[in-house]
Image: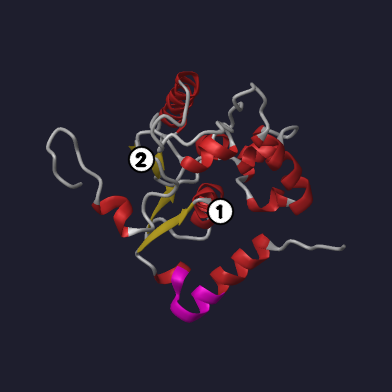
Amino acid sequence: INAEYGGKRILDALLDDLETRYGFLSASTNIVLTGTSAGGLATYLHAEYLYQKLDPKKTRFVALPDAGFFLDHANVNGVYRYREYFQGAMGLWNGTGGVNQDCLKANPKEVWKCFMAQYTVPFITHVPVFTINSLYDTYQIGAILELNCQPSVPNNCSARQLDILQNYRDDLEAVIRGVVLSDKKNGAFLTACLQHEESCRAVSYTHLRAHETGRNL
């Protein structure tokens, strides 16, 4: 089977079409680049690329990635299995043209890192990034941590599994603080919700409550 992947060409064609129809790149005064899940990851990966196509004197440009901070972390058995997907994908997709080029220069022997947010964010130097993510992201609990239980179901996880989950949560927060919030131009909204994606459904944010006030956020 012969397969050809043209994600970057699709992105460029989309930007060209938006510019032709609406003057998107030349006339916009405010642009928010956003997406959820894989789209959230793409927001990190493409932020600097889109910035280079804009005039910063005319356009205020920010990135708002939701649920795209997939952590490079070992599973419950201590194996970094999730990174293997990115290691294989970069070669399959010939994906080096669609990621942060400064990240690639810094990681010439580990280009797969530039397909992950934690290694890309330090190279997003011009664009303010506001990260939205659950620290108990249900996708990550299954796909990265491979916890093999349902934390939302009472008594479904053992005490050891819950400890592993809490350690993962702490590691995720520490990495986000280290690479996102260490840059003063950036910000974050991190929740403790057992869900993947925070902003694409009304119920995801209209039902969030602050314990100190008891009010909806």
Q: In screen coordinates, is 159 left or right of 216?
A: right
**Residue 32 in which image quadrant:** bottom left
Q: Nearer the viewer, residue 142 or 82?
A: 142
Residue 123 in view of the camera: no
The residue furthest bottom is 21
Extent of the magenta region: 17-24
Three-letter amino acid code of the residue under disc 2: Cys
> Which residue in the protein does label 1 denote?
49
Query: x, y (%) of residue 213?
Result: 12, 37
Q: Picture coordinates of residue 59 (x, y %)? A: 38, 60
- Residue highlighted by disc 2: 193
- Residue 1 on the magenta segment: no
Q: Crowding near pointer 1: few (<14 within 10 Å), some, many (20+)? A: some
What type is the residue that disc 1 sits on?
Tyr
Q: Residue 137 lies in what quarter of the image?
A: top left
Residue 22 in the image: state x and y as whole percent. 44, 78
Q: CA distance from mark 1 to mark 2?
A: 32 Å
Q: Quadrant of the N terminus?
A: bottom right
Q: Residue at x 65, y 36 (%)?
A: 82
| SS state under label 1 | helix
Residue furthest right in the image: 1
Q: Residue at x 34, y 36 (%)?
A: 192
**Which residue corresponds to the image point at 35% horizontal and 40% vertical from the top-left?**
193
**In the image shown, does 89 or 33 lie closer to the viewer?**
89
Residue 91 % position (x, y)? 78, 46
| Earlier residue among tags 1 and 2 | 1
Q: Residue furthest front?
A: 155
Within 10 Å of disc 2 (Cα), the crowding (few <14, some 14-19, many 20+) is some
